[in-house]
Image: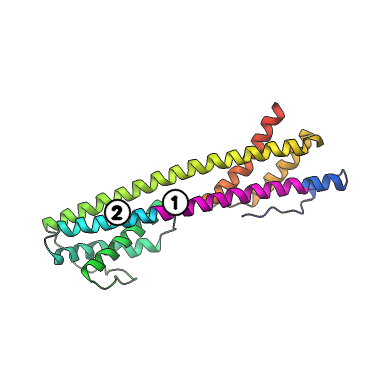
């Protein structure tokens, strides 16, 4: 979680130690919100990733079985495996872990490993297949197997897109809900200091957090969304 710098002199109130303690309490409330959002996002993402991994294993097993059935013999299946192995290692080196292209590369690597196991082949070298290898002549069975591969590949990508979209929407809604609760709690607890005073202090804390934040993951994006949304919730209380 990105740290909030705590020694900004503009955040130091001139109303004595009581208001100083209030500003510290507001800052702690925001830190707690960010921690809750990040923890929720990480837990949900990990649980969904585990379920998706189990689903991929089933899909991969079905694809290997269907490809094996489509090929005329093991030699043809071995040539199909060799054809598919050419690009996988290069794509895996570019994988970032949670985007569609990375999931696609990881699934293809999993499928190749299952094909290797079914054919009792040695693993593909990490450096990848040589580009000087001559193109493999395809049989009718090999063509059917490759069509099966492409169909299953697109299904995996489609399921991942649906999962990611659903997870982002669900977590964004929950993050906004927690931000609204935080805004209401701040108004109830510190509104006696003056709504404008509370708004200005909170704005400074949020601005400082935004300035040092570099969200590169879903939890970080949601953390930033929730922090900014507290101001929206506070604005609603100011207008009501």
Q: Quadrant of residue 127?
A: bottom left
Labels 2 and 1: the sequence-earlier one: 1
- Determine whether 207 is above or below 145 in the image: above
Q: In percent of the image, x 69 and y 52: which residue is there? A: 4
- Marks 2 and 1, how far apart at CA: 16 Å
Left/right of residue 149 with respect to residue 16 in the rendered view: left
Q: Position of residue 220 (x, y in %)?
A: 56, 51
Q: Position of residue 60 (x, y in %)?
A: 29, 57
Q: Secondary structure at mark 2?
A: helix
Say whether residue 199 is magenta: no
Quadrant, the N terminus: bottom right
Q: Position of residue 16 (x, y in %)?
A: 88, 46
Say whether residue 27 is magenta: yes
Q: Which mark is residue 59?
A: 2
Q: In percent of the image, x 34 and y 46: which residue is there? A: 158
Left/right of residue 186 with respect to residue 141 in the rendered view: right
Q: Is residue 26 visible?
A: yes
Q: In percent of the image, x 72 and y 44: which residue is there? A: 204
Local crowd size for mark 2, using a 10 Å CA cut-off: few (<14), some (14–19), many (≥20): some
Q: Quadrant of residue 141?
A: bottom left
Q: In percent of the image, x 18 and y 60: which residue is there? A: 68
Residue extent of the magenta highlight? 24-51
- Determine whether 79 is above or below 140 in the image: below
Q: Which residue is mark 1?
A: 48
- Determine whether 47 is above or below 19 in the image: below
Quadrant, the C terminus: top right
């Amino acid at each position: 979680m990105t740290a909030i710098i705590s020694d900004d002199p503009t955040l130091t109130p001139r109303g004595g130690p009581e208001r100083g303690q209030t500003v510290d309490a507001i800052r702690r409330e925001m830190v707690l919100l960010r921690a809750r959002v990040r923890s929720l996002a990480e837990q949900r993402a990990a649980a969904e990733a585990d379920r998706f991994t189990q689903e991929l294993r089933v899909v991969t097993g079905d694809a290997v079985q269907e490809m094996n059935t489509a090929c005329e013999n093991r030699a043809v299946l071995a040539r199909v495996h060799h054809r598919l192995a050419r690009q996988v290692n290069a794509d895996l080196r570019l994988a970032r872990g949670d985007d569609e292209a990375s999931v696609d590369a990881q699934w293809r690597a999993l499928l190749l490993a299952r094909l290797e196991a079914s054919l009792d082949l040695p693993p593909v070298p990490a450096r990848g297949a040589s580009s000087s290898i001559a193109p493999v002549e395809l049989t009718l069975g090999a063509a059917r197997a490759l069509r099966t591969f492409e169909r299953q590949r697109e299904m995996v990508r489609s399921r991942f897109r649906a999962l990611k979209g659903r997870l982002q929407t669900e977590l964004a809604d929950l993050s906004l809900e927690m931000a609204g609760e935080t805004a209401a709690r701040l108004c109830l607890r510190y509104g006696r200091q003056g709504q404008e005073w509370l708004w200005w202090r909170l704005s400074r804390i949020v601005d400082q957090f935004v300035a040092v934040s570099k969200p590169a993951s879903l939890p970080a994006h949601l953390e930033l969304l929730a922090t900014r949304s507290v101001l929206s919730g506070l604005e609603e209380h100011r207008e009501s």
